[in-house]
Amino acid sequence: MMATEPISLVIDEISGTICSAKDVVIGRKSFSQLSTCLGKIIDILEEINKKHHDHHDDIDIAIGIISQQTKLAKSLAEDCCGNRSRVYLLINCQRILKPQLEAISKEIGQALSLLCSMNGAADDTEGLSKELLLFEFRTTAAEEEVLNEIDLGIQERNFTRSYANSLLTLIADAIGVSKEPLVLTRELGEFKEEVANARKSKEKELTEAVQMEQIVALLEKADATLSLREKEFNYSRKRDALGRRALDPLQSFYCPITGEIMEDPVEISSGQTFERLAITKWIADGNTTCPLTVTTLSNTVLRPNITLRKSIEEWKDRNAIIRIASIKSILGSADEEEMVKGLGQLQDLCEEKESYREYVVLENCLKILVGLLAKSNRLIRHLVLSILSALAKDNDGIKELIADVENSVESIVRSLARRSEERKLAVALLLEMSRCEMVRDSIGRVHGCILLLVTISNGDNNQAATDATELLGTLSFLDALLYFLAKFSCYDVVVKGSGDIKKVMVATLAEMELTDHSKADLFRDGALEPLLHLVSHGDRDIKIMAVKALQSLSSLHQNGLQMIRKRAVHQFMDLLRPHDSTSSVLQELVAVTIMNIAKSVPTVEDDESLGFLESDDDISWLFSLIISTGPNIQCSILQTFYALGQLPSSKDMRTRLRQFSAIRVLIPLCEHTDLILRASAVKLLSCLMEGGDDSLFTADAGQSFLKALSSIIETSNDEEEIAAAMGIISKLPAGYDKFTQWLLDAKALKSIITFLTDVRLVGLLKNPILENAVGALCFFTVSTNHESQRRAAEAGVIPMLVQLLGSGTALTKIYAATCLAQFSESSLSLSRPIDKPKFFFCCSTPPELGCAVHLGVCSVETSFCLLEADAVKPLVRLLGEEDHTVCEASLKALATLLEGEMLERGRRVISASEGIGPVIRLLTSHDTNLQEKALRVLEKIFQLEEHKKMYGASAQMPLVDIAQRGSRKIRALAARVLAHLDVLHDQSSYF
């Protein structure tokens, strides 16, 4: 059979897969990366097709693998394009798409590697093979945001309607569908159906099934899940079943301590239930008995009484519905005093709980409430406006229902002509309603609300426009201008209007307290260009107000990104330089704006230029301002460099800052009394110490600085600052005993260890504080300082480190294994020799048992023995981790058992812990450093005959592969191990 036909078919299959992958929404970043690689494979296959016209079994096998995996990739892409629920795939992408795409990529990479070996490996082909073998599934920023918000909602039990609505909007953006209710309802229905099918087929583990049910429960809170008619029907049926009288609370609802109805009932070991806050305070005050039974508590565990809490919530909901129905009947009465009382109760209910707000709407109170705005009683109108604002908050559906009530917007607008308090309430309500796109037009049609702004937007510099602008500037409800500024294109007035108009309009933009949504709207409606135009205005007040407005808007990352693309940073940098018109206020505003823009840099595409801080002169000049400016500007500049310094591409910037003596400047600032400035300096210093020159640090760090770091770890409320302080300690150069002693004297070790026992940190999947705490311990556990090792061991650090080997993040595991390795390096010298019997053997006490490796008497606290700490098996398990650096750290720790006279005994211990097989498997790693470390361990292990017999056969083929294809350094090393296995003789050319 000729190879030509299969290759042609595979090329067609690859083309089809690439075409299918173009339509993928979920996981599109990873599908795009795989498609790019597949496109390059087409060129390789066409080249092979030209060269090979005869039958080649190995080529056919490789092509068969590529064909099979390409079909799998196409099937997976088609699943993502409509065969499965997009919401389900999004939520489960790490479980479904990640393993499949990575497996497909690795299989194709191995097949490509086989083609390379048969066809002669070109550099680009071999590089493509490695890229496929190292392929990792990556989510987009939108997908990551959805997954994070879901986790946060479930962890915090935030099952509110507003949270569900917001989450559903994020999901719609991530899966590329419209936010129309019908579309969202359809997508949610498909998701629920797939969850149900997965449950029936037992596709998920129990924990995953529970999580899916929680996500369904969360999303079902969204407005899109039920029609208004369905909600009204369900509410009416529920209300009619309750009767007309409120129920008194059961005695069990009351907390025995506070005498109040419980919000969060918890049960203690005596079986009694109390309000969580009350019983927590009781125990914190030192009480050890039950407040009710006076029996001694066996433990202080608080178990949520879910059944009772649900009963209390049901009782509250029942009575709330009855109260709302009762209040509705009062609102139609002629007694205004009773009406005010009822409205006050209704306001309290609306502010108490989201579900109560929905009950008010479902009770058909909106029409009645809007009608009350025509009352002459000012207090009634105030209460109604407050209630309507509470109902409309974060609920677009209710905003639309209010707007649909006849003459509702006109009635609200009429309140703008009344006294200040009512005017503020009316503006707040209109502003809230204007955040719903469907309601904006109905507000815009009411000209009385925007009469002043219409006058200004005409752009006439006549007295009427000036007077209107002046009047507008005296109003206290500037927030209301947000929507109307965009609606009536008032930005022309900002640039073209008279001086008075210009000042008031820019001041309005500058003083607004905007939501992120509003900030995005302003930039989308064209606010950036006119404000940037004013940054260079001759009037200093206008310049300051324009920068203040841009500073506020730049806090939204997508706006900062727009400023980068408009090259606005150059204008801001110029304003920082000394000018006649430069003021400290302006400089502070500019510095914050630059900082905000820097924080948006992670959203810049890889091929985009930042347009600032790309030259040595700019970096040196901006950093020099830290020396000559006040704390506010210093903080902003430090945070600017910190934001940029964390980027993968910022290695050159960190190097330049170190060359500009940045470390020397930062160390004193880490002791500053201004806490914000101090925290900014500590974070940047930790960033700059990554991969830096030790001498740059050791020359300037003194005892007071290290004492300041210790104080930060112990007392700071800023978690990022605490993590950074411990990060600095983790990067301190080893061997500086005076640094160690200063930190011990400042009780830094004790403070660091507290974070290892904090269950809130240990339980999190990723926590920089925990990671850096373990990293800082590496400094205290170096084998050259037995005193600091002893202090750490006596504090119980070693068992904690062993625990973290199985539960920490990859970085935590690396640090933990490194600490254990350093401890173990001292074990042989600290192991106590076994005492010999002094008298007749028959009369002496039984001899002490020696350590299997160190032969003397070992313990965790005195000799830091890995065997006594039960650390060997957890270290062996780390050898199976995907992260190569974790495997290296584990190998380093295990290798400490193979040094010198311990060699033979250490080999037996590692073998007994089933550790030799995993070391052999590391030979197939693509990481040459890891291969080398595994080879050095195996070189020692295979000196023992019994291990050669047990494991030699499984190691031969990987060793031969390395001896043939590896670098010169590890080829010789592999050859030495093969010589131990009697596969090569000592005079082999491999040496």
Image: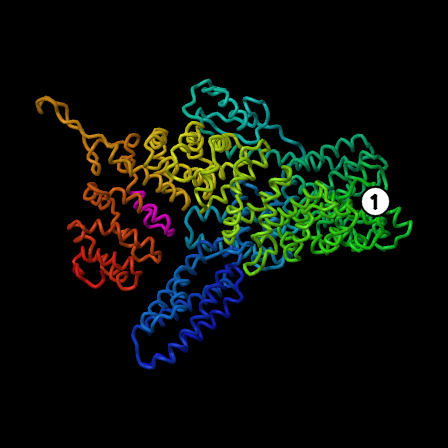
Vertical relation: 487 (above or below) 908: below
Q: Which residue is mark 1?
A: 472
Residue 851 lies, in percent from the top left, at: 21, 35
Residue 47 lies, in percent from the top left, at: 40, 77
Residue 418 position by quadrant: top right
Residue 853 vs residue 84, the one in the foreground: 853
Question: Does residue 518 appear left or right of residue 185 in this picture?
Answer: right
Residue 507 visible within the image: no
Residue 24 vs residue 614, the one in the foreground: 614
Q: Which quadrant does the N terminus fall into?
A: bottom left
Q: Is residue 36 magenta?
A: no
Q: Which residues are magenta?
A: 873-890
Residue farthest to the right, as pictured: 463
Q: Is residue 881 magenta?
A: yes
Residue 25 visible within the image: yes
Residue 255 position by quadrant: top right
* Secondary structure mostly seen in the magenta stretch: helix
User: Looking at the picture, which amino acid does disc 1 mark?
Assistant: Leu
Residue 229 lies, in percent from the top left, at: 67, 51
Assess disc 1: are there few (<14), some (14-19) or many (≥20) residues with their C-alpha within 10 Å of its C-alpha.
Answer: many
Q: Which quadrant does the C terminus fall into?
A: bottom left
Residue 94 vs residue 462, the one in the foreground: 462
Vertical relation: 121 (above or below) 597: below
Assign a secondary structure to mark 1. helix
